[in-house]
Image (cartoon, rainbow, N blue to C red):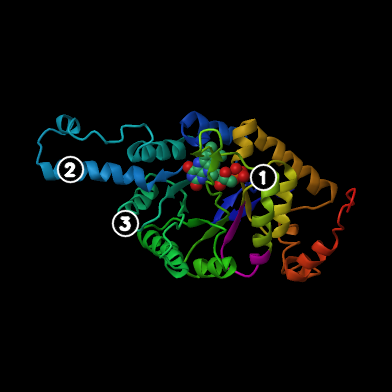
Amino acid sequence: MDLSTRYLGLDLKHPIIASSTPLSETLDGIRLLEDSGASAIVMFSLFEEQIRRENEAFDFLLESGTESFAESLNYFPHVDRSPKGPEHYLNLISKAVAATEIPIIGSLNGVTNEGWIDYAKQIQDAGAHALELNVYFIPTDLELSPAEVEQRYFDILQAVKASVSIPVAIKLSPFFSAIGNMAKRLAEAGADGLVLFNRFYQPDFDLERLQVDPRASLSTAEEIRLPLLWIAVLYGRINTSLAGSRGVHSATEVIKYLLAGADVVMVASALMKHGPNHLQVLFEGLEQWLEARDYQSLDEVKGVMSRLNAANPGAFERVNYIKVLESFEAPQFPGA
Ligand SMILES: Cc1cc2nc3c(=O)[nH]c(=O)nc-3n(C[C@H](O)[C@H](O)[C@H](O)COP(=O)(O)O)c2cc1C
């Protein structure tokens, strides 16, 4: 059976990609993801903040005119010496590309189009086969208009596209008033792929300590609904690759994303929970489902349940929402 697919112009053996997680923070982790069957790996992100910190340290050294680098570091207490800094990141990409046979996709995470964008080129020079941009921006400034928020994505994309020749994907937020239009314009602006969707950090409240609780949680399979809807709506209507990202915990979600029209699916939480070997479970489940229905290739299922191919496109629209609400009857409670 032919499970091959194309994503960002890259030929992949099958559609199941390891998403950006700490599992790619070491070369052993990256090798394990490949050995467990990932068809490509999106690296953990290099963050704008990490790059800025390093640049600020560098500027400080230039301005202070210090001759000895090692000595001057002592004067700058905020230098990030963590092993996840930019230099380590680029080295790890080089090593990963040399040590594996699958595409390695670098990941840059930021919100402005200044300074850190240079690292797109450095990630390319380190050998990455493609780049994913995660614009993780929460517009808490109430003066910022929707147009200004959207423009950030275009500015970043354009700056990155101008500096690299490798394909570039954007991990998109679901929080736009017109997601479809945003996706279409990003594709027209040169995005080689869209990853739907970014999973935003949503803090909780700790009622005992009356503090904002910053704990992040892993996803659940229920979370595929929103990306599934938008992949189904976008399939065949914009000229860019589509990645289903969020809520892939079993082969069921893999198959649903493909039927909606995704070229690939990305898995993070399930790998954090069950380990990289879970990729095999997803792969075998997909294969069994296709075999049981005599499909010969992935192309036969891709987009079959998209809005474009649906017997009833209204299933994705308001009319269906009303039907769903009507299908509920009020439960009978004593005294009602
Ligand atoms: C522990 C953890 C770390 C993550 N780190 C990153 C990251 O560095 N960059 C990024 O773009 N996404 C990161 N993500 C988001 C995932 O790549 C993925 O988009 C998201 O978790 C939704 O997929 P899932 O439902 O399979 O978890 C992280 C997710 C988890 C659970």
- Between 1 and 237, the one lying in front of the other is 237
First in sequence: mark 1 or mark 3? 3
Which residues, given as a range, are shown in magenta? 233-244
Badge 2 marks a residue whose secondary structure is helix
Disc 1/disc 3 C-alpha distance (Å): 34 Å
**Mark 1 vs mark 2: which is more N-terminal?**
2
The quadrant of the rendered image in which ligand 1 is seen is top right
**Where does label 3 land, which residue?**
114
Q: Quarter of the image holding residue 288?
A: top right
Residue designated by label 1: 248
Specify whether tag 2 is near ligand 1 (CB below 8 Å): no
Question: Residue shown at 41%/44% (left/top)?
Answer: 46
Q: Are discs 3 and 2 less than 8 Å apart at CB?
A: no
**Residue depth check, mark 1 versus mark 2: number of the one nearer the observer:** 2
Callout 3 amino acid: Glu
Give coordinates of residue 53: x percent, y percent.
29, 42
Does residue 335 sit above or below 323 in this rendering?
A: above
Residue 268: image quadrant is top right
- Mark 3: secondary structure: loop
Image mark for residue 185: none
Tell me residue 195's x, y (percent): 56, 55
Reply yes or no: does residue 258 show up in magenta. no
Q: Is residue 178 left or right of residue 96?
A: right
Q: Give the residue number, with chain letter if any, for mark 2.
A: 60
What type is the residue that disc 1 sits on? Answer: Val
Quick check: 120 left or right of 3? left
Q: Is residue 75 toward the left or the right of residue 184 in the image?
A: left
Instruction: Evaluate if marks 1 and 2 touch, with contact meaning CB atoms under 8 Å apart.
Output: no
